[in-house]
Image (cartoon, helix red, strand yellow):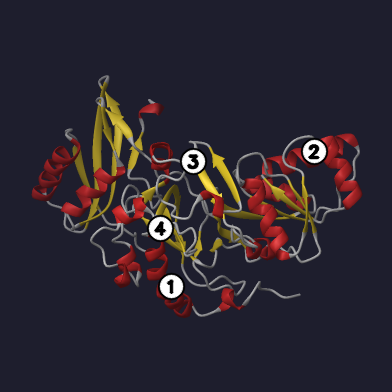
Amino acid sequence: MTSHYDALETRSPSGREADLFARLPGVLAAAAKAPAYAERFSGIDLTSVTSRAALAKLPVLRKSDLPALHKAAPPFGGFVSPPAGSFGRLFTSPGPIFEPEAACDDPWRGARAIFAAGFRPGDIVLNTFSYHLTPGGFIFDTSARALGCAVIPAGPGNTEQQFELIEAYRPAGYSGTPDFLKILLDAADKAGRDVSSIKRAVVSGAAFPKSLQEEMKARGIDAYQNFGTADLGIVAYETAAREGLVVSEDIIVEIVRPGTGDPVAEGDVGEIVVTTLDPHHPVVRLALGDLSAVLTGPSPCGRTNMRIKGWMGRADQTTKVKGMFVRPEQVAEIGKRHPELGRLRLIVTREKEADAMTLSAETATPADALREAVAATLRVVTKLSGNVTLVAPGSLPNDGKAISDERKND
């Protein structure tokens, strides 16, 4: 059995990087035809954006900002230049955010993810993601059909009718949330229905804890996690190596310091930022609000693209202190003003029935003068007073947290 979807998955990392960044200026030029991107790129020589360092200088587009942007300039906030009618399907997701689907065979770039989970041409797949208004059902439907699979468009719920379909068509594969897979299996056991044909699964859209992974394995189902969004489709996918998630081809993933567009050191936890290389519908530096970290080296499965650890929490740690919002980007600004500092964490607590905050900062050169200077910068940037504690490099957790609000535990 072929182990890889195509030769792109096993090319040299340097070759892939060269290809992606050779294509990027043309994609940026296509993006700049949309008025919102044209405004963002004003004064930037897009032909010079041929490296990760150059890309990191472009502004990020926060997914959390999309609902307001789409409402102000419907339907796509001015970030899409082709008319809505040039796309294949048009969706919405909570916000609301509006997403177009390209009119091509694998618009959400998911066929290789399903292949990595063991699906093959001719397989039958029970797809239980919703087909109603949101793109989830179609992301996995089009991905499976691009691979050559037949799809049962089941959607979620209605387990009794799903049992009839499973017993009639005998699907080998399942796509949907891990939660609904358990519901389906438990209901089948209770009703005495035969769903034993399902041997493989691709799951997304909800947590897939180790306990549930082990349960699926014990029930004879080989389940693989996918990470994706309604805006982008499949961003990264699990392989038989079971060591992180491999980034999809034809996209660029960056891990940045939360609240900024600044890349973190390899291995550090940060926010996932994605750029797609589809000239018809480019997405440039979309900050997803999700945390992850890069795993070093290629996957043992032979795929050579970047690997990420998977979903590690949310990046938006904005909190209110003494009636004022404090944001991760403000913590990052303090670090920029004091380059001798490493990781920073602002800890918010309650002391004597009042909000209090302490900035812990890693540094190899602790001194009273530095602590006082950082405390002054903290006041200037946040408009709030707080304590500063200087700690040794490596003392703070590598979890992507810039702000830790500990008041809820008081």
Q: Earlier in the sequence, mark 4 or mark 1?
A: 1
Q: Is residue 154 left or right of residue 342?
A: right
Residues 147 and 302: in front is 147
Marking on residue 15: none
Q: Earlier in the sequence, mark 4 or mark 3?
A: 3
Q: Establish if 205 lies above or below 261.
A: above
Say what amino acid the circle numbered 4 marks: Val
Marking on residue 284: 4
Which of discs 2 and 1 lies nearer the camera? The answer is 1
The residue that appears at 45% across and 72% down in the rendered structure is: 20
Callout 3: SS: strand
Q: Which residue is mark 3?
A: 97
| CA distance separating discs 3 and 2 | 34 Å
Q: Which residue is mark 1?
A: 23
Asked if the residues shown at circle 3 and circle 2 are in contact, with their CB atoms under 8 angstroms apart, the answer is: no
| CA distance separating discs 4 and 1 | 13 Å
| CA distance separating discs 2 and 1 | 48 Å
Say what amino acid the circle numbered 3 marks: Ile
Callout 4: SS: loop
Callout 2: SS: helix
Q: Is residue 247 left or right of residue 285?
A: right
Marking on residue 186: 2
In this rendering, does residue 160 appear at all? yes
Which of discs 2 and 4 lies nearer the camera? The answer is 4
Say what amino acid the circle numbered 1 marks: Arg
* Residue 151 spot, x, y in % from top left: 77, 53
Q: Earlier in the sequence, mark 2 or mark 4?
A: 2
| CA distance separating discs 4 and 3 | 16 Å
Q: Is residue 141 left or right of residue 317?
A: right
Q: Establish if 400 lies above or below 403.
A: below
The residue that appears at 43% across and 72% down in the rendered structure is: 23
